[in-house]
Image (cartoon, rainbow, N blue to C red):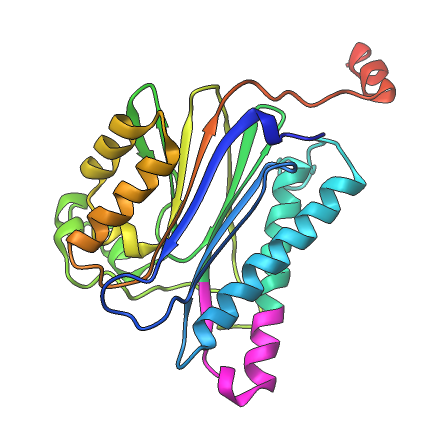
Amino acid sequence: MNLEKKFDCVQLTDVGRVREHNEDAIGTNMEAGLVVLADGMGGYNAGEVASGIAVKTVLELVTEACAREDRADLEPETGLMRQSIVLRDAISRANKVIHQTAKSQPQCEGMGTTIVAALFYDDRVSVAHVGDSRLYRVRENQLEQITMDHSLLQELVDRGFYSPEEAQQSTNKNYVTRALGVEAAVQVDVVEHPASPEDVYLLCSDGLSDMVDDEDIHLTISTFGANLDTAGKQLIQLSNDHGGKDNISLILTHVLESFPAKQGLISKLLSIFR
């Protein structure tokens, strides 16, 4: 099922004001309803190698899986849609590739990457992430952070040492507790939500979320949401105006209309007897 006309999507990346090169990677396949963003880390160019592997692997594996089967069956052990399982497993595979590359190539030793990805299917969105790259949703003029950072700071918030407001002002935001490539296996957090027309989804690296607070992110999307390209450029400009201490990457996706899955004959017959 080609979903390209169901969405308006813009992807932008910027090196920022401090870094010499860009270690972020972004990619989309809107025919499959897939958007992916990764924020690499490591010495020399190793961070961009890790993020590039992550995005390429997830795009390839998820696209292949979507082409093979067009079903929304539930996995009995997890209760997750098959699309969520595909997304989770693709990220797990990317982790193995990055980890093996880091072990086999000395110049890539110690590299890793965060990742956040969203897969739209049958009026739902599956969101998977590792690290502190984020996904936000704007619905009915309300901004909500859908992902929770895998970071030391978030753990301190969860334990009550910081309030969310204090955490936003903290200067110690960059220690992640989970990333692709660090270990041979990684836990991928996956959630599913209904997706509705007029929803706007923002995937971003911490180069944006560390520099621009949620209120300004919300105000920018609300003000310029009719033109996603302008909204994205304004968000990058805000981040640079606030210091641009890291690479800044984002993907904005606007749901234009409902996108129910087409039922095959067998699925239709089965639904009659459920």
Which range is magenta? 97-113
Residue at 33% over, 62% down: 15
Where residue 186 appears, x then y in whole percent?
53, 63
Residue at 61% over, 47% down: 87
Q: Residue furthest bottom?
A: 106
Residue at 29% over, 32% down: 221
Q: Residue furthest top?
A: 272
Closer to the camera, 14 or 127? 14
Q: Is residue 106 magenta?
A: yes
Closer to the camera, 62 or 148? 62
Q: Is residue 5 positioned above or below 207 on the image? A: above
Residue at 78% over, 37% down: 69
Q: Is residue 252 magenta?
A: no
Quadrant of the rendered image containing residue 270: top right
Where residue 22 appears, x then y in whole percent?
38, 66
Can residue 145 be seen by looking at this rendering?
A: no
Quadrant of the rendered image containing residue 185: bottom right
How many labels sit on residues?
0
Q: Is residue 127 positioned above or below 194 on the image? A: below
Q: Quadrant of the C terminus?
A: top right
> Magenta stretch: dominant SS?
helix
Closer to the camera, 57 or 266? 57
Give left or right: position of 58 versus 16.
right
Give left or right: position of 39 versus 161.
right
Where residue 263 appears, x then y in whole percent?
77, 20
Give left or right: position of 162 versus 85.
left
Where residue 264 appears, x then y in whole percent?
82, 21
Can residue 51 be seen by looking at this rendering?
A: yes
Q: Quadrant of the N terminus?
A: top right
